[in-house]
């Protein structure tokens, strides 16, 4: 295990195969309840993986999932992991107004707290959808008492991204202690490269992620933030043939090798919960200019 820098942030975005943004135009939310549910079996496999590696993580969980799987929420908490909010039903923040976002937060938080019996202090926006269009989102998060967010991808991407955002922890509001912890990027030839997990981790060689995390840890002297989804370790999940080819390629590529890559990752570096990382990063966080 690489000990050149203290613990990196390990996170799981808990959603099922039919919740993802890639399929939002071909799978109706009204049909979710009738589809094959695989999130619990996949999360249990992840919990075993983490137990074998003796690491703790944060599970950013949809309220929709928490309401249907309270026993899973309790197992996650009982094994020492953090539960945090991923919103109610994967609606992107930039498609909501202030009122609907506030209601989404309240509904998802209640489902998580009712299921696990513990306070929910962290939030990750679906598809990293807090960006330059939604500065008001931080005010609502602060008003509702969230301690931190990890909702920004500081890159350019066709589905998400806030390229001008800081690469590392920042305080989005001068009057609040709320911390934003962006997902990890590396730099090469003056460009930012997405390097925090998900599809990039599945598709690219493992060596790229090792290089990126080491760059952040050793050169920048900061922790990395990594994420993945339960469906990414499930090559037997149902297929959605009506989805566009580009979406299917992104979603299904290298599912077979994801578990082995994750096992290597969690054993090679030092990992921990996002709430612990947020407390540690508070002293380093810059405050955004008004």
Image: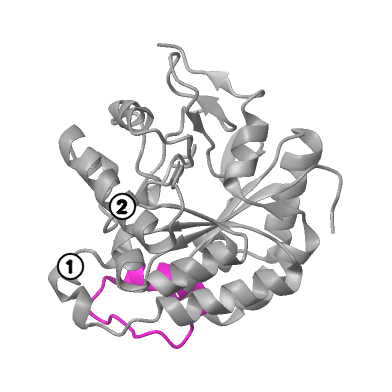
Residue holding disc 1:
29
Between 170 and 143, the residue placed more toward the observer is: 143
Label 1 residue SS: helix
Crowding near the residue tagged with mark 1, few <14, some 14–19, many ≥20 C-alpha atoms within 10 Å:
few
In the image, residue 212 above or below residue 172: below
In the image, residue 168 above or below residue 115: above
Q: Nearer the viewer, mark 2 or mark 1?
A: 2
Q: Quadrant of residue 5?
A: top right
The N terminus appears in which quarter of the rendering?
bottom right
Q: CA distance from mark 2 to mark 1?
A: 20 Å
Crowding near the residue tagged with mark 2, few <14, some 14–19, many ≥20 C-alpha atoms within 10 Å:
some
In this picture, residue 286 sits left or right of residue 218: left
Residue 130 at x, y = what percent? 36, 38
Q: Is residue 126 visible?
A: yes
Residue 270 at x, y = what percent? 76, 54
In the image, residue 142 above or below residue 114: above
Between 127 and 41, the residue placed more toward the observer is: 41
Magenta run includes residue 55: no
In this picture, residue 63 sits left or right of residue 166: left
- The residue at 34%/50% (across/down) is 109
Q: Is residue 254 visible?
A: no
Residue holding disc 2:
110
In the image, residue 231 above or below residue 102: below
Question: Is the Cβ of the residue at disc 2 closer than 8 Å to that at disc 1?
Answer: no
- The residue at 33%/34% (across/down) is 144
Residue 133 at x, y = what percent? 28, 30
Bounds of the magenta segment: 231-252
View extreme (bottom): residue: 236
Between 231 and 272, the residue placed more toward the observer is: 272
Between 262 and 26, the residue placed more toward the observer is: 262
The C terminus appears in which quarter of the rendering?
top left
């Amino acid at each position: 295990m690489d000990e050149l820098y203290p613990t990196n942030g390990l996170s799981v975005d808990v959603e099922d195969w039919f919740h993802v943004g890639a399929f939002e135009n071909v799978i109706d939310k009204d049909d979710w309840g009738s589809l094959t549910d695989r999130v619990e079996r996949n999360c249990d496999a992840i919990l075993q993986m983490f137990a074998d590696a003796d690491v703790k993580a944060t599970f950013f969980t949809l309220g929709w999932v928490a309401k249907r799987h309270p026993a899973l929420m309790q197992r996650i908490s009982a094994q020492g992991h953090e539960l945090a909010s991923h919103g109610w039903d994967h609606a992107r923040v930039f498609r909501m107004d202030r009122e609907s976002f506030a209601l989404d937060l309240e509904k998802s938080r209640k489902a998580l707290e009712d299921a696990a019996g513990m306070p929910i202090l962290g939030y990750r926006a679906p598809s990293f959808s807090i960006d330059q269009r939604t500065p008001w989102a931080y005010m609502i998060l602060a008003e509702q008492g969230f301690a931190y967010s990890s909702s920004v991808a500081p890159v350019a991407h066709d589905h998400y991204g806030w390229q001008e955002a800081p690469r590392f922890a920042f305080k989005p509001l001068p009057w609040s202690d709320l911390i934003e912890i962006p997902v990890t990027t590396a730099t090469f030839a003056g460009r930012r490269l997405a390097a925090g997990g998900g599809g990039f981790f599945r598709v690219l060689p493992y060596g790229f992620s090792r290089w990126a995390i080491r760059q952040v840890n050793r050169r920048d002297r900061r922790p990395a933030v990594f994420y993945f989804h339960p469906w990414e370790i499930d090559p037997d999940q149902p297929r959605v043939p009506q989805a566009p080819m580009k979406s299917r390629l992104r979603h299904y590529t290298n599912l077979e090798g994801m578990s082995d890559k994750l096992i290597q990752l969690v054993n090679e570096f030092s990992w921990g919960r996002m709430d612990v990382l947020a407390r540690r990063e508070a002293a380093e966080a810059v405050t955004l200019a008004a």
